[in-house]
Image (tube, helix red, strand yellow):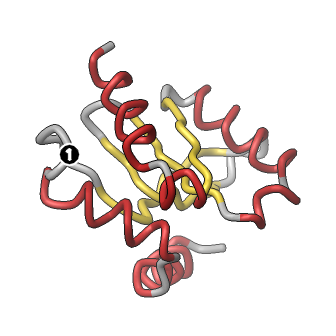
Amino acid sequence: MHYEQILAYARQLRKDQTEAEKFVWHRLRNRRFQGIKFTRQFILSYKDHKLQSQYFIVDFYCHEYCLVIEIDGIYHEFQLAEDKERDEILRSMGFTIIRFSNEDVLNNWKEVALALKRHFEM
C-alpha cells in the first residue's frame, strides 16, 4: 500500500474505534494519563528486506517513550504469528510494545493503568 492509502485507512480506523479503544483513548487523550502525550492509530514506517517502505498502524503511540500500546480483540487470537513478527520488527526499531486485551481494558482498567504506570516509572 502507498502512504496515502495507509493514511486514509488510519483516519478511518480513528472513526471506527472499538469500544475498548474508545475507552482507552478517553483516558489517554489530552495528556490525561500521567501528563504524557499519546496519539491514536499512528502510522510507523520501516523498510523491508527489499528496501521497500512498509507501514504499521498502531493503536496508541507515545513518542516520548517510544511506546506502542495495542488493544487486542478476539481477532488477534487467530493472528498470533503475525503479531509476533510485527512486534519483533517494532522492537528492532527501538519501540516497546505493550498489549492488552479488550476484556482487560474494559473489565480491569485499574490493573491496566497500573501496568502502564510501572512502565513510565522505569
- From the top left corner, tell me how far across and down residue 120 is, in percent: 29, 24
- From the top left corner, tell me how far across and down residue 68 is, in percent: 46, 43
> Which residue is found at the position 67% from the left and 64% from the top?
73
Residue 31 left/right relative to 108: left
Up/down of 76 relative to 109, above or below: below
Report the number of numbered marks. 1
Q: Secondary structure at mark 1?
A: loop
Quadrant of the snapshot with the C terminus: top left
Up/down of 24 relative to 8, above or below: above
- Residue with the most extreme top position: 122
Quadrant in the picture for residue 57: bottom right
> Which residue is found at the position 68% from the left and 53% from the top?
52
**Depth check: 114 or 78 in front?**
114
Residue 115 left/right relative to 47: left
**Depth check: 42 or 73 in front?**
73
**Depth check: 1 or 42 in front?**
42
Up/down of 7 relative to 59, above or below: below
The kind of residue on which mark 1 rests is: Phe
Quadrant in the picture for residue 118: top left
Residue under label 1, please give it: 33
> Which residue is found at the position 87% from the left and 45% from the top?
81
**Depth check: 93 or 104 in front?**
104
Quadrant of the snapshot with the N terminus: bottom right
> Which residue is found at the position 76% from the left and 58% from the top?
76
- From the top left corner, tell me how far across and down residue 43 is, in percent: 46, 60
- From the top left corner, tell me how far across and down residue 42 is, in percent: 42, 60
